[in-house]
Image (cartoon, rainbow, N blue to C red):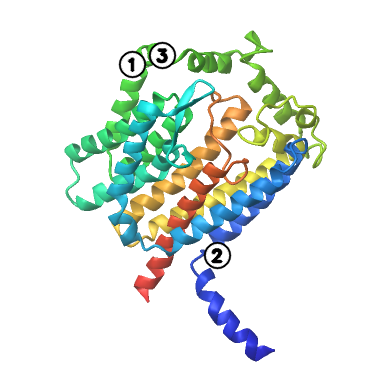
C-alpha cells in the first residue's frame, strides 16, 4: 500500500506545489464563508449554491493555470492582452448588446463583458510599461501611463458602468503610485479633482447623480432610489454584536435586501453573524492583503513588484467599496465582495489575480534555488 501511495504523491505534488500555502488557506476560508452566506441569501433561488460551486471550480482552474505561467511570460503578453481588451471595448461601443439600459456585453461566439478583462490587463500593461523604463521614470512616463489608464476607463464609463470604471481606474492608479509618483503630484491631483467636481457632476448620468443624492439622504425616496441603502443598513445594524444566527436573517428571508446574493451579500452576512462575524471577515481580508503585500515586497523584479502590489490593492478596493456601499458610507455601485458574492465573471477575475500572485511567489523561490 505504501509503495503505491508514494508514486501517486510524487505525481500529484507538482500540480499542487504551485499554490502558495497562506494565500490558499485564506481564500479557502473566504470561499467557505461565502458559500454559507450564498446558501442563506439564495434559499429561495434553487441551484444558486450549485452554480456558485461550479464558478469556484472554474476560478480554481484559472488560478492554477495562472500560477503555473512564469511572470516573464505574463510580461510578454501584457501588450497583446491590453490591446485585445481595448479592441473589445471599442466593439462594445459600436455594436455591443444592451441590457437594462447599459451596453456592456459583446457576442464573440459567447457573450462576454470586456471591461472585466481590463481589471487585470490594466495593471499588467502598466507594470510592463514601467519595467521597460526602470530607472528612467520621469513625468513623461507618468503622463503616458495616465493616458493608458484614461482610454479604457473612458470607454467603460460610457457604457455606462461607473463601478467597473472606478475599479479599472484604481488598478491603474496603484501601479502608477507604486512606480514612484510623488506625493506632491497626488496632492495636486486631489485639489484638481475637488475643483472639477461641478464639471464631473454635470457629465454624470441621471441615475449616477441619484445614487450620490441617495447616499446623502436615502429617506427622501425610501420606496424608490433609497430603498437599497435603507434596507441594507437596517440589516447591518440589526445583526448586533453576535448576529441573529445562520439562516435566521429576517431582512434577507423576507426579501427586503435587494441583490442579496451578489452586491449586497455583506448585508445578509452582517445580519446573521453580527459584529463578531464582521471582525472575523475583516481579519481574513487583512490577512489576504497582508500576504499579497509580502509577496509584492519580496518580488524579484520591478515588473512583478508593481503587478503584485496593484493586484493586492485591487482586492482591498473590492472589499472596501462593497462594505462601504452596503453600510451606507459610499454610493451604490456594482462591486462584488471578493470571494463571497455569487457570480462567475468576478470570481474568475479574482482567481486570475490570485494565480498571478502565486506565480510571482513561486518563481521567486525557483529563482533563489
Q: Which residue is mark 2?
A: 21
Calculate the distance from the C-alpha at mark 3 to the C-alpha at mark 1: 11 Å
Q: Which mark is residue 117?
A: none
Residue 294 falls left or right of residue 121: right
Residue 324 falls left or right of residue 295: right
Q: Which mark is residue 195?
A: 1
Residue 182 falls left or right of residue 25: left
349 or 281, which is in the foreground? 349
Q: Residue 45 placed where, x, y %? A: 74, 37
Classed neighbour count for the residue bearing mark 2: other residues with Cα under 10 Å, few (<14), some (14–19), many (≥20): few
Q: How many marks?
A: 3
Q: Residue 177 placed where, x, y %? A: 33, 41
Q: Residue furthest front?
A: 109
Q: Residue 234 placed where, x, y %? A: 72, 24
Q: Which residue is mark 3?
A: 201
**Element type at mark 1:** helix
Classed neighbour count for the residue bearing mark 3: other residues with Cα under 10 Å, few (<14), some (14–19), many (≥20): few
Amino acid at each position: 500500500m505504501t509503495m503505491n501511495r508514494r508514486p501517486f504523491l510524487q505525481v500529484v505534488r507538482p500540480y499542487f506545489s504551485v499554490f502558495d500555502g497562506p494565500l490558499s488557506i485564506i481564500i479557502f476560508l473566504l470561499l467557505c464563508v461565502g458559500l454559507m452566506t450564498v446558501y442563506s441569501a439564495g434559499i429561495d433561488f434553487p441551484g444558486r449554491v450549485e452554480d456558485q460551486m461550479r464558478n469556484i471550480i472554474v476560478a480554481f482552474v484559472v488560478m492554477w493555470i495562472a500560477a503555473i505561467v512564469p511572470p516573464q511570460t505574463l510580461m510578454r503578453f501584457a501588450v497583446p492582452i491590453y490591446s485585445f481588451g481595448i479592441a473589445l471595448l471599442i466593439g462594445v461601443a459600436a455594436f455591443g448588446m444592451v441590457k437594462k439600459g447599459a451596453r456592456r456585453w459583446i457576442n464573440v461566439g459567447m457573450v462576454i463583458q470586456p471591461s472585466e478583462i481590463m481589471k487585470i490587463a490594466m495593471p499588467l500593461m502598466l507594470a510592463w510599461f514601467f519595467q521597460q523604463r526602470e530607472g528612467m521614470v520621469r513625468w513623461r512616463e507618468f503622463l503616458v501611463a495616465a493616458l493608458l489608464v484614461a482610454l479604457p476607463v473612458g470607454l467603460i464609463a460610457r457604457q455606462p458602468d461607473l463601478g467597473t470604471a472606478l475599479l479599472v481606474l484604481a488598478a491603474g492608479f496603484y501601479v502608477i503610485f507604486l512606480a514612484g509618483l510623488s506625493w506632491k503630484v497626488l496632492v495636486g491631483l486631489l485639489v484638481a479633482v475637488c475643483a472639477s467636481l461641478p464639471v464631473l457632476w454635470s457629465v454624470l448620468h441621471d441615475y449616477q447623480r441619484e445614487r450620490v443624492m441617495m447616499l446623502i439622504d436615502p429617506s427622501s425616496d425610501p420606496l424608490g432610489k433609497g430603498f437599497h441603502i435603507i434596507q441594507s443598513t437596517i440589516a447591518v445594524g440589526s445583526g448586533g454584536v453576535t448576529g441573529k444566527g445562520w439562516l435566521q436573517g429576517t431582512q434577507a428571508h423576507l426579501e427586503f435586501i435587494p441583490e442579496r446574493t451578489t452586491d449586497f451579500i455583506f448585508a445578509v452576512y452582517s445580519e446573521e453573524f453580527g459584529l463578531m462575524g464582521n471582525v472575523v471577515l475583516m481579519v481574513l481580508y487583512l490577512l489576504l492583503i497582508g500576504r499579497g503585500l509580502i509577496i509584492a515586497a519580496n518580488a524579484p523584479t520591478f515588473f512583478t513588484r508593481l503587478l503584485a502590489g496593484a493586484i493586492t490593492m485591487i482586492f482591498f478596493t473590492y472589499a472596501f467599496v462593497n462594505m462601504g456601499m452596503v453600510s451606507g458610507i459610499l454610493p451604490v455601485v456594482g462591486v462584488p465582495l471578493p470571494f463571497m458574492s455569487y457570480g462567475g465573471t468576478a470570481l474568475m477575475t479574482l482567481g486570475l489575480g490570485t494565480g498571478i500572485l502565486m506565480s510571482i511567489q513561486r518563481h521567486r523561490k525557483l529563482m533563489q534555488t
